[in-house]
Image: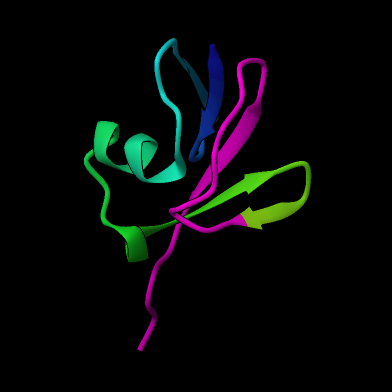
Amino acid sequence: MITVTLGSPKQQLTFPKIKTVLQLLNKLSLRVNDALIIREGELLTPDRHLRSGDHVTVRPVTSRG
């Protein structure tokens, strides 16, 4: 089970069968460049594997021109 903290105000979701960051992004309907995925202070790339018990934070990327 992966625990995900999203946005502000903070919302927590859990996913039982997510194996990679890319699968998580797809489940959240996000593209690779739409959000940063952080686990224990480390930015994760889409090919990184997630483990049961992981807690990750999803931070949306915004452009301010």
- Extreme residue in the bottom direction: 65
Residue at (35%, 66%) from the top-left corner?
33
Q: Is residue 43 above or below residue 11?
A: below
Q: Whole-percent x and y of residue 61?
A: 43, 64
Q: Which residues are magenta?
A: 44-65
Q: Assign the C terminus to one quadrant of the image.
A: bottom left
What's the coloring here? rainbow
Q: Whole-percent x and y of residue 8?
A: 51, 39
Q: Is residue 43 above or below residue 62?
A: above
Residue at (45%, 43%) from the top-left corner?
21
Residue 37 within the magenta-colored segment of the rendering: no
Q: Nearer the viewer, residue 41 or 16?
A: 16
Residue at (45%, 29%) from the top-left corner?
19
Left or right relative to 34: residue 42: right
Q: Nearer the viewer, residue 36 or 65?
A: 36
Which quarter of the picture shows residue 43? bottom right
Which quarter of the picture shows residue 50? top right
